[in-house]
Image (cartoon, coloured by chain):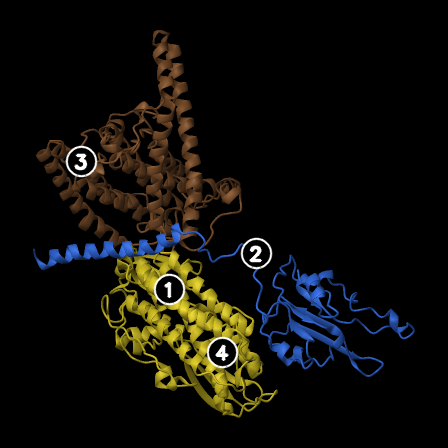
């Protein structure tokens, strides 16, 4: 798909700059529409999945009214939210209040861009993909604070302050643990990282199995990532039993939906990073895809990639419906006294491993031993 | 004009707030997340029950006691019935006594299940709440079988109980007693010994034995402070002196004696003990009347009496003055939650907002009883 | 390794272990279907137990007009007006039960001296758009004019009071009529 567009662009290189620009703009618009519809569709089903998982865990049935198995529930919810009265509190800072949800959503949506869904399906292949995602998604904290401050509500403000403190703090263990993974393929390019993990039956060369330090790094990353997307047990910015609804207390209708969708978008992004960096991205386990026709291989790769992401999202939901919430100071304690130092030593350990074994993973070393 | 202290922010928690357990309003002075002073404002549920008692006949007031502590209606019925019976000086048939104890203890379990569930949802874990509700439904079914209502039972009457038990009740109760203990283990695995939960509750809001006595804290909250005081043992009413049960006291398993975790755990232990009591009562069953001979027009001899009984939330006392007519001259209700709430301002100096939620949840107050 | 650092790691391990214990409980519910305890209400309706205190009904034909129920009612939900008919028997011309005031305590049912006169039905779905609809009218209506024959008396099926048709009292208490009425 993207290949095709690239081909078109390649063919018109000879044409006038005017037409070339037109095509570029078209490509940008079309690809963003595709990604946006994918993101919205995913977010719809994620909300459905969340409620269904919650229902399963709590010995309930969950949504089952709209469509088969309640699958169209998110459509009904979306329509409901669209039709709701849009309330802007009288004493709110209107500009901040209005603009905040869009920034949150844009930041979360922008992070979909550098993901590599399969060998040829991606929007943009950035050589700094991982860095880009981390940079873009940290904008969220600013937007949350804007919304919280703009609401002119004390509970919102509490939520916003908590959110910023939390997101900024937890970026450190996230980046440190990601570094431990990144130094193995020594690239920030999503595609390079995935290509590095090919071979070994499509499983054993995953970076998570590369060495003990990357294994630990994954758990640190995943814990910190849950905090980054404000989910239980780290959902203190929303903390419905303490702060009513946290930073989006005053939001209604579609503006609220944007915050809501951004949360699920962020879940997808952090899971996608984990799948890419630790679980081999779109590498198909056990099946050698080389002999397959291109379309089949690409489809399989997309399916495999999405499956990995959804498994991680399921784990996040599972954790959410199991654990109580930490207190704000305990959350900081976990970050600064546990995750950050451990991630730091983990990074050192991973670096030493790379130095000692010349970047080879456990699987490489063992297979080399047995071959000789 | 009042001087505004700018270091502190006034924050209204309630009357509509997810974790004030009803319509309680707490005016909090906060310095950021830290609470410096809490003032509870009560009365939103005031229905003048004590005044209503003066214009109703003695049997007519029984349904109103259902509405004191609606989660433990049986126990409230019981305490009221005991009060009037003491002035009447009548003998309660043995079968009625056994039935009363069974109902009171089953209701204690169902009330503690709500305490357990609501504290867990205050702490951010929603699943245990629904698990608690699930087991409570079983007890509600039992009560519906006996008296036809699922919340406001009006079953324990002056002189005995309203109706004898229907066929199949004993079997269903035995079924419940077999079904329930494994669920307690599930609660413990899921919540009680969860590290986050312990971290949220241990060493929080410690009530020293002296404070507990000074403030008139009763029930599980008093026992959590290490004072072995249970009216079922100290001033045995009905047939509690023939029953074999333990009175759990706080031992400071996870922190100091009398902390929020101890208060929470008292309820888990008491549920086990109550199940044990019900089992013994079923073995002790004997044929007989379910209600003593009480005249249709009930005239209570003139006099004053104070009777207290061990409710799930503490000592429920009725101070009754009778002038010899069919209606009470004055009925004063000593509600346990009222005294338990009074210690909140003392406990909440210097805690965080999230702890305040834990304090209210662990004290397990109920508003209709406080406001009356 | 100092005591402190040992505590650091032990605390961490304990925490991780307890988290996984909790996750073990929930995944048991998450993966095995059929452990739902909830019911799909409008489709599946649970049958209340026999003693269920639902909507109050009066078999007005056997009512003796003793007003015991109205007197015991703690919330004055029952309005009962009786007159003497030609046989000097008390006749409940007005018997209104306000279901919005009723607290379903059951004192009236116990006070009623006639068997099966005032009783609870298992009906529990009677929400309505107005409070007036919540008042059940059971009264026999005012006495007939002296010149009219007795057969022209308003029958219990068509009470004189303007009331919603669904609150008609039931004649016998056979199962068929209950089924028809109890919706």
Residue B77 is tagged as 4
- Decide: few, some or many residues near mark 3? Use Cα within 10 Å; few <14, some 14-19, many ≥20: some
Q: Is residue A164 left or right of residue C150?
A: left
Residue under label 2, please give it: C44
Residue at which label 1 appears: B183
Residue A123: quadrant of the picture: top left
* Marks 4, 2: nearer the viewer: 2
- Among the chains, which one is brown? A
A199 vs A8: above or below: below
In front: label 4 or label 1:
1
Quarter of the figure with the N terminus of chain B: bottom left
Q: Nearer the viewer, mark 2 or mark 3?
A: 3
Image spot of residue A47 (x, y percent): 43, 43
* Label 2: how many Cα within 10 Å (few below 14, some 14–19, many 20+): few
On the question of residue A244 being in view, the answer is no
Of C154 and A285, the residue lying toward us: A285
Q: Is residue A106 above or below residue C43?
A: above
Please report the residue visible at 87 percent of the width from the left and 71 percent of the height from the top. Answer: C151
Q: Nearer the viewer, residue C75 or C164?
A: C164
Q: Give me the residue at 54% from left, 71% from top.
A: B145
Q: Which chain is yellow?
A: B
Calculate the distance from the C-alpha at mark 4 to the C-alpha at mark 2. 33 Å
> Which residue is the site of mark 3?
A363
Disc 2 sits on a residue from what chain?
Answer: C
Q: Residue at x 39, y 50 (%)?
A: C31
Asked whether B86 or B99 is in front, the reply is B99
- Residues marked 3 and 4, same chain: no
Mark identifier at residue B55? none
Residue A140 x/y as whole percent: 32, 39
């Amino acid at each position: 798909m993207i290949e095709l567009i690239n081909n078109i662009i390649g063919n018109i290189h000879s044409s006038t700059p005017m037409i070339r620009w037109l095509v570029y703009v078209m490509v940008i618009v079309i690809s963003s529409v595709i990604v946006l519809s994918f993101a919205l569709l995913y977010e719809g089903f994620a909300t459905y999945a969340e409620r269904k998982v919650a229902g399963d865990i709590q010995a309930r049935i969950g949504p089952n009214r709209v469509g088969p198995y309640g699958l169209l529930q998110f459509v009904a919810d979306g329509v409901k939210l669209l039709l709701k009265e849009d309330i802007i509190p009288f004493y709110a800072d209107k500009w901040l209040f209005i603009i905040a949800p869009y920034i949150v959503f844009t930041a979360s949506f922008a992070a979909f861009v550098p993901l590599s869904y399969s060998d040829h399906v991606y929007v943009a292949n950035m050589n700094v993909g991982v860095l880009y995602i981390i940079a873009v998604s940290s904008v969220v904290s600013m937007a949350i604070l804007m919304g919280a401050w703009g609401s002119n509500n004390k509970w919102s403000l509490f939520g916003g302050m908590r959110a910023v403190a939390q997101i900024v703090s937890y970026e450190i263990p996230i980046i440190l643990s990601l570094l431990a993974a990144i130094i193995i393929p020594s690239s920030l390019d999503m595609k390079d990282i995935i290509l590095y993990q090919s071979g070994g039956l499509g499983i054993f060369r995953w970076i998570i199995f590369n060495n003990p330090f990357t294994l630990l790094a994954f758990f640190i990353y995943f814990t910190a990532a849950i905090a980054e997307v404000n989910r239980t047990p780290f959902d203190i910015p929303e903390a419905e039993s303490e702060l009513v609804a946290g930073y989006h207390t005053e939001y209604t209708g579609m503006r609220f939906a944007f915050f809501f969708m951004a949360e699920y978008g962020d879940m997808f992004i952090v899971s996608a990073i984990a799948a890419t960096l630790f679980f081999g991205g779109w590498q198909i386990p056990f099946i050698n895809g080389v002999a397959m026709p291109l379309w089949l291989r690409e489809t399989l790769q997309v399916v495999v990639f999405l499956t990995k992401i959804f498994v991680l999202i399921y784990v996040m939901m599972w954790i959410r419906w199991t654990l109580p919430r930490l207190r704000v100071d305990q959350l900081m304690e976990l970050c600064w006294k546990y995750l950050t130092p451990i991630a730091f030593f983990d990074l050192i350990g991973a670096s030493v491993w790379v130095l000692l074994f010349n970047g080879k993973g456990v699987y490489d070393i063992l297979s080399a031993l047995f071959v000789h | 004009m009042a001087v505004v202290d700018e270091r502190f922010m006034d924050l209204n928690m309630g009357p509509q707030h997810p974790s004030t357990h009803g319509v309680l309003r707490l005016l909090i002075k906060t310095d950021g997340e830290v609470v410096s002073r809490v003032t509870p404002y009560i009365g939103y549920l005031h229905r003048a029950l004590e005044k209503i008692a003066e214009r109703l006949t003695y049997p007519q007031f029984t349904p109103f006691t259902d509405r004191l502590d609606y989660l433990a209606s049986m126990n409230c019925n019981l305490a009221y019935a005991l009060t009037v019976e003491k002035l009447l000086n009548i003998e309660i048939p043995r079968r009625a006594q056994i039935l009363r104890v069974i109902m009171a203890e089953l209701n204690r379990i169902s009330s503690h299940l709500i305490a357990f569930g609501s504290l867990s949802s205050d702490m951010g874990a929603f699943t245990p709440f629904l698990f608690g509700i699930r087991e409570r439904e079983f007890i509600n079914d039992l009560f519906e079988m006996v008296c036809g209502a699922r919340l406001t039972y009006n079953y324990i009457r002056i002189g005995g109980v309203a109706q004898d038990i229907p066929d199949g009740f004993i079997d269903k109760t035995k079924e419940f007693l077999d079904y329930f203990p494994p669920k307690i283990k599930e609660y413990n695995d899921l919540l009680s010994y969860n590290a986050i939960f312990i971290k949220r509750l241990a060493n929080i809001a410690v009530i020293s034995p002296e404070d507990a006595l000074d403030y008139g804290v009763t029930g599980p909250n008093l026992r959590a402070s290490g004072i072995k005081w249970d009216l079922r043992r100290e001033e045995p009413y009905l047939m509690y002196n023939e029953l074999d049960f333990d009175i759990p006291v706080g031992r400071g398993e996870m922190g100091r004696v009398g902390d929020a975790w101890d208060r929470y755990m008292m309820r888990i232990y008491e549920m086990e003990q109550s199940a044990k009591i019900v089992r013994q009562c079923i073995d002790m069953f004997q044929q007989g009347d379910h209600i003593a001979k009480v005249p249709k027009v009930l005239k209570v001899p003139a006099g004053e009496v104070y009777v207290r009984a061990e409710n799930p939330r503490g000592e429920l006392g009725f101070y009754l003055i009778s002038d010899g007519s069919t209606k009470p001259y004055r009925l004063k209700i000593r509600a346990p939650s009222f005294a338990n709430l009074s210690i909140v301002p003392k406990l909440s100096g210097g805690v965080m907002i999230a702890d305040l939620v834990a304090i209210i949840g662990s004290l397990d107050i109920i508003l209709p009883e406080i406001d009356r | 390794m100092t005591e402190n650092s040992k505590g650091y790691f032990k605390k961490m391990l304990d925490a991780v272990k307890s988290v996984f214990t909790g996750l073990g409980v929930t995944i048991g519910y998450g993966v095995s279907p059929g452990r739902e305890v909830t019911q799909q209400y409008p489709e599946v309706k649970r049958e209340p137990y026999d003693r269920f205190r639902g909507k109050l009904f009066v078999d007005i034909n056997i009512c003796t007009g003793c007003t015991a129920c109205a007197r015991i009612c703690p919330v004055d939900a029952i309005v009962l007006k009786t007159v003497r008919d030609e046989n000097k028997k008390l006749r409940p011309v007005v018997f209104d039960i306000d279901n919005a005031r009723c607290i379903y305590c059951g004192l009236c049912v116990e006070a009623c001296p006639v068997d099966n006169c005032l009783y609870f039905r298992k009906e529990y779905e009677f929400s309505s758009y107005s409070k007036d609809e919540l008042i059940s009218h059971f009264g026999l209506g005012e006495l007939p004019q002296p010149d009219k024959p007795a057969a022209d008396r308003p029958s219990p099926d068509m009470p004189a009071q303007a009331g919603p048709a669904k609150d008609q009292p039931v004649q016998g208490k056979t199962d068929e009529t209950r089924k028809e009425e109890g919706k």
